Image (cartoon, rainbow, N blue to C red):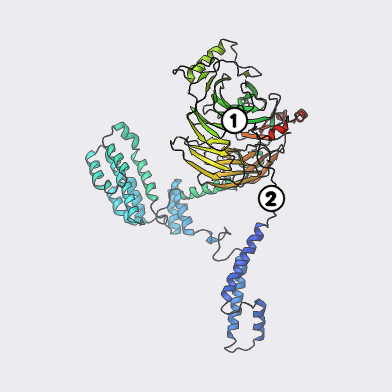
Amino acid sequence: MKFKRNLIKNNNNIPTEGSSTSRLQQTTSTTTTTAATTIENRNNNSVKNSRNFQDIGESEEESSSTTTKDRPNKKIKLELNSNMSELHNHINGIDQDTHLDDINNPSFVNKKELVRLLIQSLNSLGYKKSADFLEKDSGISLQSEQVNQFSQSVIEGDWERVESLLPYLKLKSIEEENNVKFLIYSQKYFEYLEKKKIKEALQCLRSEITPLSRDPKKLQTLTSLIMSPPSILESKIKETTTSRLTLLNEIRKYVSSDIMLPENRLQHLIKQAIQYQITKCLYHNTTDNFVGLFEDHVCQKDQMPLSTRFTLRDKHKDEIWYIQFSHDGQKLASCSRDNVILIWDMSGLYKDPLVEPKVIHTLVGHTKEASYLSWSPDDSMLISASNDGNLKLWNVSLGCCIKTFSKHTDAVTTCAWHPDGKRFISGGNDRNIFLWSIESNGSSSSSSSTINSRSSLTNTLNNINSSNSNSNGNNSNSNGNNGNNNNNNIIITTPIKMWVSARVNDLSIHKDGKQLIVICQEKKIRIYDIDNEKTQEISLPETESLTSMVLSNDSKFILVNTSNQEIHLWDLEKKIIVQKYRGHKQSRFVIRACFGGVDQAFVLSGSEDSMIYIWHRQSGTLLETLSGHSGTVNQVCYSPCDPYLFCSASDDQTIKVWSRSPSNNNFMNNNINDSSSNNHSIKNNNNRHNQG
């Protein structure tokens, strides 16, 4: 039997990266070489390639005659002096053709463009007098008088004048001109309808809009508005002034920026600069959206959760293989080699940092290790996948099993909920991927009788709730509620769809619910179309064995752990690896990485050396290595609602809760790594290597 932890490949040493030459030396060397090459090419017509600067000087000293034959030497000397000066200027960054390295150089930006941006910004900020003064003082206009008249005519709705001034926009093609006219005529049509001038609107539609329209759907939509009731019409047409401003901004997209500046261009450039600084800030992890303009943006490492807040021990009796926060961050589910699943209450942490998480439910039912957990979209249910070949659906509030899904013939390694909350997908070592419905009916585990077709999940929950309330009347206690105390467990053996694959290591479902991403033992990332009757598959090849994966919140990227001690960040849209993360140890067991922090700016992973590694997502820079565990750290899981909180699960049978460093030392009363945790031996270690 294969446990969830085993890998295929042996340990591969990470290649040592050589020391790199400083950026300044590289830049200077490259610049010098380029400039010298340019000078040499210029001198080829007057000096042979084999001659150096010294040869030239000596030839000039020997030449004391002023004959016509010797005059070219003076020209060579003058050219040489000029070229040496050019080389000096090039190296020092003041070459006439190179201004990007010296922001203080007046030629770094175009003066006229900068003044136009300032005038536009002053106007947008409401300082019209200042904008007019700058325009007059500099002699530089924001835009031509005709373009000003065009903009004003659009705002005033003078459509005849707008059309007469259209040539001053100097559009590049007839097609662009027709597109702009279509926008103008459509606005005029909307306003006729708003004023209930149906005759004029119909005339505009027939004679002006229809000849320009190449999209039958758009034309059909516009035509249908004539017959629309006032309530629908009002919802489609905003106030006249607002829609005219929108029209003007749409027209800008077709006009050269030399003629009409894009809206709020300077503010847009500032926003780009701020965003760039944030992406380069290695420790950026703040929810404060304000970034000052007077200094470059830099965050300190105190924004990071680098300290242990709590060590949760003595609840699991063996290695902890998997943990997962609920989507609202209020609960944490964990599963262990002891076959037990625990539900932890994490809500108190967000109110009082001294409130230690407590177990609220103990879920028992699997006959072998549970190795994977998945919360339903509304956090009301939990799916567990086990090495016993079964999946169990648990009611979280009641702490009991609702249904068991039994079709796999080997260990179930992974599962994921569909966004609709009614279906989920599982994959296992039997090379099968199944799509299940939680509303499916099956046979009762207590009587094996067929459930009536009218039976539903809701009825099942009601029955469980009733039976529990009639028993002890208390669903949980300090030790958690045992989730195996009901007789309403329904067994489902028929999935609604299946795919045949290689042995499945992990899978995720795209947030749109249309795509299934799977990693298998064949060193491929497979992408399936979930609802298409004809199975469509896209394969992304990898060179190493893939052990686990996690999908980003926007479903555009996946993190993939590999057996050669690397984590790969894949761009699913471009279908390329955009970053690799190195430093952690992974050669024997399954290690699960995660995204974390504000905007998922960090990558975190456990390691076989008992450490936790944190990288900057964009640059791949290793930021921190955290100690505290005494066994392999199998998984790191970040809180979805707190950028300063994450948990880690280890073979040392503990879960650690990590947060920012406290201001009060008493806050860390549970931070000390109790020596008792070191006494937990890793049981039956040899079994973790059996592929089975």
Q: Amino acid at mark 1?
A: Asp
Looking at the picture, tell me which residue is in the foreground, 34 or 569: 569
Q: Earlier in the sequence, mark 2 or mark 1?
A: 2
The x and y percentages for residue 408 are 56, 29
The x and y percentages for residue 69 are 58, 88
Residue that protrudes farthest toward the left in the picture: 199
Please indicate whether residue 500 sits to the left or right of residue 65 in the image. left
Badge 2 density bin: few <14, some 14–19, many ≥20, Cα 10 Å: few
Q: Name the secondary structure under disc 1.
A: loop
Please indicate whether residue 160 sits to the left or right of residue 326 in the image. left
Is residue 663 placed above or below 46 in the rendered structure? above
Q: Amino acid at mark 2?
A: Pro
Please indicate whether residue 15 sits to the left or right of residue 44 in the image. right
**Quadrant in which the N terminus is drawn:** top right
**Which of the 4 quarters of the picture holds residue 219?**
top left
Residue at (62, 72) in percent of width and height: 84
Please indicate whether residue 256 sits to the left or right of residue 13 in the image. left
Looking at the picture, tell me which residue is in the foreground, 625 or 678: 678
Residue at (60, 83) in percent of width and height: 73
Answer yes or no: is residue 660 visible. no
The x and y percentages for residue 150 are 34, 51
Looking at the picture, tell me which residue is in the foreground, 174 or 14: 14
Is residue 474 placed above or below 495 in the rendered structure? above
Q: Label 1, on which residue?
A: 410
Badge 1 density bin: few <14, some 14–19, many ≥20, Cα 10 Å: some
Residue at (60, 11) in percent of width and height: 472
Q: What is the CA distance from the residue labelled 2 to the residue labelled 1? A: 37 Å
Q: Name the secondary structure under disc 2.
A: loop
Q: Label 2, on which residue?
A: 15
**Quadrant in which the C terminus is drawn:** top right
